[in-house]
Structure formats: C-alpha cells, structure tokens
Amino acid sequence: MNLAAATNESLAEMSNVLIYSSMAVYTLAFLAHIAEWVLGSRSRVGRTAAALTPARTAAPAAVPQVKAAGGTAVLDRPKVVTRSAGGARDVPDGPGAAGGDEQGDLYGRIAVSLTTLAFLVEAAGVVTRAISVQRAPWGNMYEFSTTFSTVAVGAYLGFLLARKNVRWMGLPLVTTVLLDLGIATTWLYTESDQLVPALHSYWLWIHVSTAIFCGAVFYLGAVATLLYLFRDSYESKLAGGGSPSAFARSVLERLPAAASLDKFAYRVNAAIFPLWTFTIIAGAIWAGDAWGRYWGWDAKEVWSFITWVAYAAYLHARATAGWKGRKAAYIALIAFACFLFNYYGVNIFVNSKHSYAGV
C-alpha cells in the first residue's frame, strides 16, 4: 500500500453527499413504517387473547378467509401456532405490522422499498469513501458506523429475500440506523485520509469486516430479544387473566409469538457466534504481526473477550432447562451491551492501543 497515496477529495465529498442522501431516504422509510403500524387494520389483532382463552384453545388453527372489515379488504394469511420457550402455552404469530390490512400492507411495502433504496445509496457512499483513499472503508469510528449500519440493513433485507417474516423489525431497525448515522455524521465524522502504518495490513479487511458483520447480526438478535421480552410479558398477562392496555394490544398483537421471537434471536446469535470467535482470533494474529504479541490485555481485547464470554453464557443458558426464556434473554441483552461498550465506550472513554485509528 502506498502510504503517500493522495485522497481523492471529489470522491470523498461524493461519499458524504451519498451518506446524507441515504439518511433522507431512511427518514421517508421511517415515516412509511409508522404509517404501516398506525394505519394497519386492527380487526385481526386479539388472536393471542383468543388462543389463551380456555374455551377456544382446543379449536383447530383455522386459516382466515378473505373478508371485508369496515369496507377494507383483509388479506388471506395462515394462522401460525407455535409453542413458547417454556412450553407452557400455544399462541399464534401476530398478523404483522400491517395487521393483515391491504392499506397497511401497502405502506409496509413502500417502507421496504425505501429501505432498500436507502441501503443502496448508503452502500454507494461506503464504497465511494473506500475508493477515495484506496483502502478498506473502516479505518475509524465514522467509517465503522456507516459500514455497520449498511451491513445491518443488508442482513435484514437478506432475511426478507429469504422469505423470512421479519418485516416487524423494519421500524426499530430504521430508527436505529438513523440514530447511528446521526451520531456518525455529527460527532464521529473524520476526514477521508490515509491510515497509520500499523493499519496497513490485509488483516484490516479480515478482522474488522468480520467484527462489523458479527455486530450487525448481533444487533438483529438483540432487537428480537427485546421484543420477545415485551411479547412474553404480554402473553403471560393474558394467560393470567390480566387485561393489557389498548396500546399494548394494538402493538404487541401484531408481533410474532414470543416463541417465534425467542427462536429467531437464538438462531441468529448461535449462527454468528463461531464467526465472532474467529474475529477475536484474527485480531490476536494481527496483534502478533503489528505489535509482536498476540495478547496484551488492551481494553479492546479485553472487552472483545468479555463479549465472547457473555454470548457463550447465553448459548449455554439456552441449553439449560432452568435458564431458558426470559433469563437467557437478559443474558443476551447484557452480551450485546458489552459489544456496544466495546464499540463506543472503549474507543471514546478508554485509552487503548486501538485508539490510533482516531475517532
């Protein structure tokens, strides 16, 4: 790598424009998702309450027919019944953010289309940033943040392409991406420039790219885990004869069943955990090449290992009968909090050898 390579200022400026443009499109996607949730029909909610009513639990899971509700056509979608993590109740998956309503579903499709467009624009901004300096576009926290949000949205769209029912994640995802990009462009922005010699290694492509991908998937798992806790609490309240608020019914009835959310979170965390293990090993090998030692108890190294231990504890808890469900979910959220602290806290508040990359 030529350390004296000049930065292409025109491409760097184009990258900035593309990132800001993607934020504008993400904002439109956010509004479309809001419309999907607000304008989606409520005629299909209440299925969990019906499933937990003793007089109706013995009835077979029927397939809803196309019908008119208040003059609005309702989509024909199957009722999916799953078993909760604790195995104590069978409840149906919610009909989705749109509530099975054609108008709400239309806004949802618009939201996904806008999210896809924003993803492409943001990805172009990341690639343009890389070309402007002829290196990997994750040499500082600004670049890491923009790449991280791009990969997170890409993973979400990948699940949609695989026909997985994850559109319920669209609103929290777009909200978080806007927050991430707002922080990146406001407080973390760093001019496009060359890196210090220690970072000029092919391990920058391997180690940091895997860390970004792992973090993006861990984020999707954390969103599902958090929603699982809300949905499980809602189901428990209904099972105990309680009466949740109208807002809780309107929102939580549209989500997948707690069991489905719990299963999704577990699968994505379990699938990405081996790659996180590789990320730590790759970082140690890079440290050996750059600093002459594989492990030096640097803050970034320590918190990467703490994150690994936390996720290992979560996976172990999932395999232990007494720790399934909510207890394991709390561990998963603690593990993701460790990842976030390793990402933001260590870089900003702790003196570390990894600080040479700049904020």
Image (cartoon, rainbow, N blue to C red):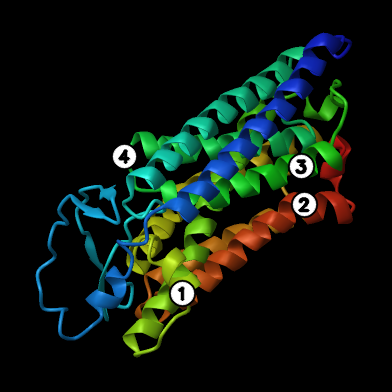
Q: Which residue is mark 3?
A: 182
Q: Say which of marks 2 and 1 sits in front.
A: 1
Q: Say which of marks 4 and 2 sits in front.
A: 4
Q: CA distance from mark 3 to mark 2?
A: 14 Å
- Dot 3 and dot 4 residues touching (CB under 8 Å): no
Q: CA distance from mark 1 to mark 3?
A: 33 Å
Q: Which residue is mark 1?
A: 246
Q: Kindly identify the amino acid type of the residue bearing the numbered disc 3.
A: Gly
Q: Kindly identify the amino acid type of the residue bearing the numbered disc 1.
A: Ala
In the displayed orientation, state which residue is furthest to the bottom: 241
Q: Which numbered dot is residue 163?
A: 4
Q: Is residue 225 above or below residue 65?
A: below
The answer to whether residue 59 of the structure is visible from this angle is yes
- Dot 4 and dot 1 residues touching (CB under 8 Å): no
Kindly state the secondary structure of the residue where label 3 is placed: helix
Q: Say which of marks 4 and 1 sits in front.
A: 1
Kindly state the secondary structure of the residue where label 1 is placed: helix
Q: Is residue 105 left or right of residue 182?
A: left
Quarter of the view holding residue 28: top right
Residue at horizontal 23%, vertical 75%? 51
Q: Which numbered dot is residue 344?
A: 2
Q: Is residue 22 left or right of residue 355?
A: left
Q: Is residue 242 above or below residue 212?
A: below
The earlier-in-sequence mark between 1 and 3 is 3
Q: CA distance from mark 4 to mark 2?
A: 33 Å
Q: Kindly identify the amino acid type of the residue bearing the numbered disc 2.
A: Tyr
